[in-house]
Image (cartoon, helix red, strand yellow):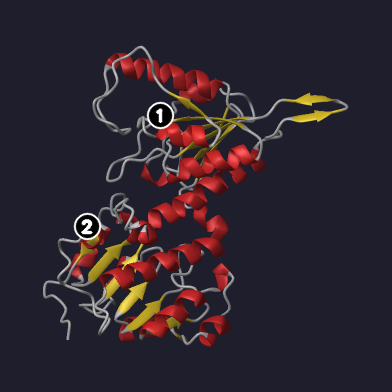
Amino acid sequence: MIIGVFKETFGNKVGLVPSVVKKLVKRGYSILVESKAGRKAYVATAEFEEVGATTCKREDLFEKSDILISFTPLSDEEISLIKPGSIYISHFKPYIYKRVADKLIEQNIWAFSLDMIPRSSIAQSMDALSSMSSIAGYKAVLKAAALLPRYLQMMITSAGSIKPAQVFVIGVGVAGLQAIATAKRLGAVVVAIDTRPETEDEVKSLGAKFLKVTGADQPKEQGFGAPQSPEYIAKQRQMIFDTIASSDIVICSATVRAAKAPVIVTKEMVKNMRRGSVIMDLAADAGGNCELTENNKTVTLNYVRIVGDSNLSDAAVVDASTLFANNVYNFLKHISNKENLQIRTDMEEDEIFSSSCIARPQKTLSNE
């Protein structure tokens, strides 16, 4: 089986790194890497060749590869060049880019989206969404700190004392937890909110305060998209309004898979923030948690900057590439036949396989 690795067109990562290429070669795979594929991730072509990979032109990948890998999906035009029956592994985000699955199905290929891996113990090593979210939460705090016109930590100097910055984290998933931990390490006072009550212990264990609505009927269902009573919604909105007004940094990471991100931070809330404050919206490509968010742009209102960035993992491209490559390696181990490295077609009942497979050929691949 030949694995082909593309040079990214829309980002800086690389789908495999030399340490993982070495393991795949040992398992019996042949690896083709597009020339200069690792340049933006600070990986030299020679490093791939030293561990057994062969460099080639982009067009050779379509012709020779049985398995294709890229972090960001190829364009529709290039997807049409993939050989029928091939396997294509990427980070498709089909819950946002809904047309991508149709194009892959038309091409009669296997397509696996590693951001659709279920959140379970057995799947953790393959879950690209968690890998990238962890980096995003970390970098969100660092980027916000660089933009904020003040210290994060408390400072006591001969000229007077400076109070620590207030950081508010909305959504306590992987990105939110990493943001809390990073902000605390930098000396900020951190407050967090999530509609899932079980996250309270995680927030407190990191030294942050957990906001929860009291004096109202608690929702029977959990999650930011779950139905809630009018009384609960009103109390929650007021609590968020008050907290945002006193915050220097707001990290938004509340997402609902397969749905538009819930709007939590309104324009009115932004208007009441202190001048110089920063909002980092990690849900920007799903519509954003802030009413004013624009993906890949910084919007300013009343001297408050709203940064829409759903690809912050690129800011740590070396580690992001390594983690994604490990996700790919562990996924291939999970779905392949050990004897001949072919994809296993008897895994339809496997949750990891079925959740990540967003396209399949009309005729199943042979295991021979």
Nearest the eye: 81 or 112:
112
When asked about the image quadrant of residue 149, the answer is: top right
Residue that lies at the very extreme toward the right in this rendered image: 158
When asked about the image quadrant of residue 60, the answer is: bottom left
Q: Residue at x 20, y 64 (%)?
A: 359
Q: Quadrant of the N terminus?
A: bottom left
Nearest the eye: 333 or 10:
333
Q: Is residue 315 above or below residue 236?
A: below
Q: Quadrant of the C terminus?
A: bottom left
Q: Residues within 10 Å of mark 2 (few under 14, many from 20)?
A: some
When asked about the image quadrant of residue 45, the answer is: bottom right
Disc 2 target residue: 351
Q: Residue at x 51, y 36 (%)?
A: 205
Q: Amino acid at mark 1?
A: Ile
Q: Residue at x 36, y 80 (%)?
A: 3
Q: Residue at x 71, y 34 (%)?
A: 151
- The answer to whether any part of residue 77 appears in the image is no
Count all numbered tags in the image, as a single digit.
Answer: 2
Q: Amino acid at mark 2?
A: Glu
Disc 1 target residue: 264
Earlier-in-chain disc, 1 versus 2: 1
- The answer to whether any part of residue 129 appears in the image is yes
Give residue 153's position: percent from left, percent from top. Answer: 70, 34
The reply to whether discs 1 and 2 touch (Cβ–Cβ < 8 Å) is no
Give residue 269's position: percent from left, percent from top. Answer: 49, 23
Determine whether, in the image, residue 366 is placed left or right of residue 328.
left
Q: CA distance from mark 1 to mark 2?
A: 32 Å
